[in-house]
Image (spheres, grey):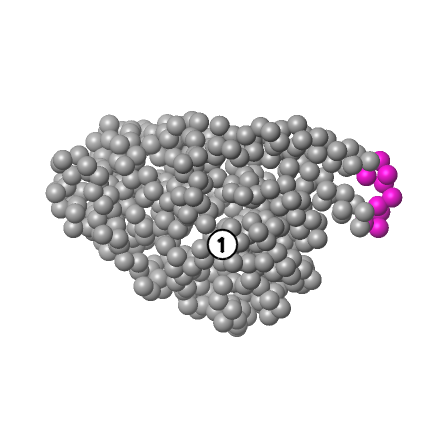
Amino acid sequence: MDCLLTHAFFLADDPKEAQIMKPYAPLGILYLASHLRARGFDVGVFDTTFSSWPELQNLLARERPSVLGVYGNLMTRGSVIRILRAAKEAGWKTVVGGPEPGAYAAEYLEAGADVVVIGEGEVTLEELLPILRSGRMENLDAVNGIAFRPADGHVQFTPARAQIPDIDVQPWPSRESIQIERYLETWRQHHGAGSVSLITARGCPYECQWCSHEVYGRTHRRRKAASVADELEWILARYNPDMLWFADDVFTIHHGWLAQFAAEVKRRGISIPFECITRADRVNERVADLLAELNCFRVWIGSESGSQRVLDAMRRGVTVEQVQSAVGLCKSRGIQTGMFLMWGYEGEEREDIEATIRHVKVSNPDIFLTTVAYPIRGTAYFDSVQDRVVNPKGWQEGSDRDFQIRGRHSRQYYQHVDRLLRAEVDLGRLLQSPASSSGILAAELHRKIDQAHEGMRATAAEVEA
């Protein structure tokens, strides 16, 4: 075997994800596997999702050492480090890549990686494998898009890797390398419908200050509509899923492409429910019609805030009114809407929180998810607050999600903010319902609102770090 690829997400070890139970296949390493195999490499894939750390550890100790490639993100940092160390002890050459390692190249090299891949990985790994397999580490500086430690011990970065210009030439992800059926079974057992993911494009060209562009930069490379339809047709015939997840950053970014794709799947007689993510400014009447025609059942929109001042600070490039319009357009066509919201962004004040609550009540999405803003290293947001960032757990034990920002409200404060939002929205929905005569429920919601306000007052003076 020339290379073993893995991704370090163990579902059973993540209490939150084990409760949600909506796992998807690791498309990143499956794309790497198909690319390398097409060029004659012998590549294995170890899917950690339904596996365990002892199983992978035993494999690394049992197999003849080769090159181990590990995909890492901020949620799996601890597992990646554990895998790298075990692999090094067993004699493997180690490579790590993905959305986080490039921002922490020195740390990952110190933790056991021989090479950190920065950016898109297919061609980089194709050039790396012969060098690592031969042990000619002095030749690493000829490979673009990596970081490593030469003999003198300093961290060396090679020139950036040019991105693949035409992603239609790339083979589809090697789904047959893992048990997609296990994913479908898990979805059906917990949610009554099995889902499979695919992507139609790579990258996002927008400039949101808190968003990482570590792998693809600010690019957008779209596959041809016919190519996506071919893959979709194959997935339906091979796995018979009940629905799909289009995992693009902005599915409706290119309106002309969306129309071509809708025409292509209609010509082939394909129709399957799916959900996707988009931006509010990329939804209009025509797009909403196309999504409904394509059988989209849910659209997720990154709203982040109901304060235009905060949105402008984030450089979101959208208005509050556009978000409300996009939600309304989708709902009017029977498409569910999900909304992502972020508390605690730099400069947010009480009036911005109140504006966000009003915004959610007016928009009335079917689902909304909230988080407290965390600065990801390598982003403009991180750069703007890094002199106040505190990592309470240390790099190896925690992640960027654990960052605290000196002077910001405490996490307890935002917990009360979250309770206020949910109670206000529930009350608004109750009062608009024909069955809103439930005075007991309304009274309970008013009690929760009062408690949330009191909790905010009590914790307003508490700040992080």
Q: Return the residue at label 1.
A: 315
Position above or below: 309 against 82 = below
Kind of residue at disc 1: Arg
Can the viewer see residue 178?
no
Residues shaded magenta: 433-442
Quadrant of the rendered image containing residue 59: top left
Helix or strand or loop: what does disc 1 sit on? Answer: loop
The one of 193 and 102 positioned closer to us in this rendering: 102
Q: Nearer the viewer, residue 133 or 315?
A: 315
Q: Is residue 13 left or right of residue 302?
A: left
Q: Who is closer to the viewer here, 303 or 316?
A: 316
Percent across and percent down for residue 122 are: 29, 53
Question: Residue 224 appears in which quarter of the rendering?
Answer: bottom left
Q: Residue at x 39, y 57 (%)?
A: 218
In x, y percent, where is residue 233? 47, 62
Left or right, 326 with respect to 451, comes to left
